[in-house]
Amino acid sequence: MKTSLFAIATSVLLLFIVCSIPLTEGGPIDVIDIALEYFGPAQDINHDGVVNYLDASSLVSHYGESGPPGWIRDDINGDGTVNYLDASSFVNKYGLEWLIP
């Protein structure tokens, strides 16, 4: 069962990535954009300065797991479960890069 759940989660995440349009520079600036300069987005799971396949790999490997809110960085929205909500949030920031202070 765990193998098939992993395969499904991988397929869903890849579908989100392929079908999404990543955020680009030149969009509206808000408080979140300013905070990214200092902390980076939650979607950068491994803190390397870019939201990419390395973060996707981590997200997929923990997909379906749950614990107390904020128990793992892969739980992007902090609700305690690594699920489609986290995958959706991840896809919206995929490809985003910034300088790490």
Image: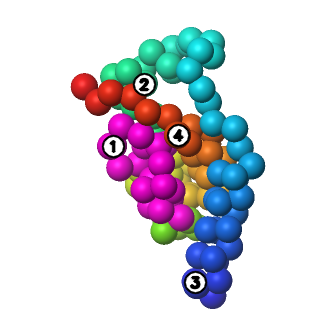
Q: Residue at x 56, y 12 (%)?
A: 29
On the image, numbered disc 4 is attached to which residue? 95
Q: Residue at x 62, y 45 (%)?
A: 91
The residue at the far right in this view is: 19
Instruction: Check contact, mark 1 vs mark 2: CB within 8 A.
Output: no
In magenta, the rendered stretch is 43-60
Which secondary structure, mark 2?
helix
Q: Amino acid at mark 4?
A: Gly
Which secondary structure, mark 4?
loop
Instruction: Check contact, mark 2 vs mark 3: CB within 8 A.
Output: no
Residue 63 placement (x, y as % from top left): 56, 65
Residue 17 placement (x, y as % from top left): 65, 51
Distance from the alpha carbon under mark 1 to that under mark 3: 27 Å
Return the mark for residue 4.
none
Which is more N-terminal, label 1 or label 4?
Answer: 1
**Within 10 Å of the Cα at label 1, are there few (<14), some (14-19), or many (20+) other Cα atoms?**
some
Return the mark for residue 2.
3
Which is more N-terminal, label 3 or label 1?
Answer: 3
Q: How is the image coloured?
A: rainbow
On the image, numbered disc 1 is attached to which residue? 47
On the image, numbered disc 2 is attached to which residue? 36
